[in-house]
């Protein structure tokens, strides 16, 4: 059996001022000239000549190898390991910086075969980095001009992990998203042109603009403006100075209104609970009712409607005075839209096309044929199709009153403001 290893990269992964840290180590392992796949055990040591600068475990004086080993999984010849992570001994980076000619010695063992020492390899490539002081973690500023080596990242399809105290805080995927595993604190203004997922919390003292979707698993605090062109999903809490919900986006704070809803911008798939709800777009409570399509044009906003005795749940235009089947008034007359519409979407038994006011204030088509209408008069149906009139016969009015007039109509026909109170 012949083993060989080609080092891909081994760079310092801690600031130059730190005394101890870790070294990401990647390589390609071949067995009998072919890329090897499977489990392997590795032993590591860094030498300068015959001087041992570092070893993964204590050196066995009898064998000259570290006593312990590191288990890795090799796929297509590729493997990676972080030297200095427990249970290995930490790496003295200051010591390595003082020995630019240091080499890495690797022993490899595979199932059924004893450990074999491979050829020593340089820890880093000295020639393109000879002008760089101390550790490569300084990123070399603008002092490196060789694109193959002057970058921070990986050269394969594996993600780049950024860790602190051995815990992953940022994952840079080869083709996926940037994952932040802890809190994300933004002090300035930020613009993101793709989707953003935050597992922890999001905090920014400036503005935050996102052209994709935003998903927050923790809490979000935005000190400036938050603009999201896509969807917003928050499993935790959001602290915003002001929120405006519009169809197609969310912006906050600095908005002119707190909690205003425009168009169809807010959709809640589950239950919604709030302490106080203020509706600014309408003034009556309505439900959608079905109307015979052939006669739908006869029921414009303001029309008095009655129950259709021949079709359960359907309404028709009321054409009889003091009709005990009177139901309500079609909402929307004189520009006053319903403030709240209740419906059971997907249930054909209660589906409908015409919003009929059941409570609140609405303008109704009226006639003064039964006398002038004054505020406070009870209104009922009339012989004029779809029009209300003043109720003057108490016996006939029982069960036929649709509400009280809140404005006047001296003569003819017109719109009267009605406080809907079916009786």
Image: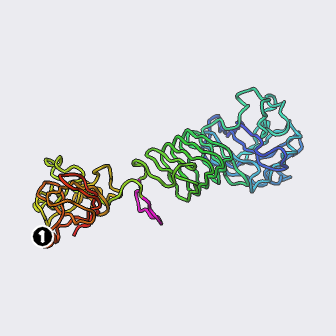
Q: Is residue 191 visible?
A: yes
Q: Residue 308's spot in the image, x, y percent?
A: 13, 60
The N terminus is located in which quarter? top right
Residue at left 74%, top 40%? 10
Q: Residue 408's spot in the image, x, y percent?
A: 26, 58
> Residue pushed farthest top?
145
Nearest the viewer among 18 and 352 is 352
Crowdedness near tag 1: few (<14), some (14–19) or many (≥20) residues, C-alpha within 10 Å: some
Magenta span: predominant SS is loop
**Residue span colored magenta:** 267-278
* Residue 27 location, quadrant: top right
- 122 vs 267, left or right, is right
Q: Secondary structure at mark 1?
A: helix
Residue at left 27%, top 63%? 375
- 291 vs 282, left or right, is left
Q: Is residue 120 visible?
A: no
Above or below: residue 133 compared with residue 51: above
Q: Is residue 268 magenta?
A: yes
Q: Is residue 293 magenta?
A: no
For the image shown, how many numbered marks are present on the structure?
1
Q: Residue 116's spot in the image, x, y percent?
A: 74, 44
Q: Which residue is mark 1?
A: 396
Nearest the viewer among 139 and 82 is 139
Q: Residue 201's spot in the image, x, y percent?
A: 61, 55
């Amino acid at each position: 059996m012949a083993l060989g290893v080609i080092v891909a990269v081994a760079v310092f992964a801690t600031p130059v001022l730190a005394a101890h840290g870790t070294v990401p180590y990647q390589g390609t392992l071949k067995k009998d000239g072919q890329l090897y796949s499977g489990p392997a055990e590795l032993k590591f040591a860094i030498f300068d000549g015959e001087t041992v600068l570092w070893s993964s475990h204590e050196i066995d004086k009898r064998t000259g190898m570290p006593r312990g080993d590191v288990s890795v999984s090799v796929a297509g010849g590729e493997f990676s390991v972080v030297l200095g992570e427990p249970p290995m001994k930490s790496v003295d980076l200051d010591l390595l910086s003082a020995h630019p000619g240091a080499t890495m010695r690797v022993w490899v063992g595979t199932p059924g075969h004893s450990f074999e020492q491979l050829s020593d390899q340089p820890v880093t490539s000295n020639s393109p980095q000879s002008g760089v002081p101390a550790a490569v973690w300084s990123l070399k500023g603008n002092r490196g001009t060789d694109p193959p080596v002057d970058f921070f990242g990986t050269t394969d399809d594996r993600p780049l992990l950024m860790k602190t105290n051995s815990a992953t805080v940022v994952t840079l995927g080869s083709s996926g998203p940037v994952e932040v595993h802890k809190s994300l604190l933004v002090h300035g203004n930020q613009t993101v042109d793709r989707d953003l997922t935050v597992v922890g919390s999001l905090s920014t003292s400036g503005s935050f603009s996102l052209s994709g979707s935003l998903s927050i698993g923790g809490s979000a605090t935005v000190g400036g403006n938050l603009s999201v062109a896509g969807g917003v999903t928050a499993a935790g809490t959001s602290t915003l100075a002001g929120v405006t919900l519009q169809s197609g986006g969310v912006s906050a704070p600095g908005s002119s209104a707190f909690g205003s809803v425009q168009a169809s911008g807010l959709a809640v798939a589950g239950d919604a609970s709030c302490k106080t709800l203020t509706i600014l777009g309408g003034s009556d409570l309505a439900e959608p009712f079905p109307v015979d399509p052939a006669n739908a044009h006869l029921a414009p906003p303001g029309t008095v409607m009655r129950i259709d005795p021949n079709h359960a749940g359907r309404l028709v235009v009321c054409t009889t005075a003091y009709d005990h089947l009177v139901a309500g008034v079609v909402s929307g007359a004189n520009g006053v839209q319903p403030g709240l519409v209740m419906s059971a979407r997907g249930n054909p038994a209660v589906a409908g096309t015409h919003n009929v006011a059941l409570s609140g204030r609405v303008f109704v088509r009226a006639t003064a044929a039964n006398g002038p209408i004054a505020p406070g008069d009870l209104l009922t149906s009339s012989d004029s199709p779809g029009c209300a009139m003043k109720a003057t016969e108490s016996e006939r009015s029982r069960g036929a009153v649709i509400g009280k007039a809140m404005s006047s109509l001296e003569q003819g026909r017109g719109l009267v403001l009605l406080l809907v109170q079916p009786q």
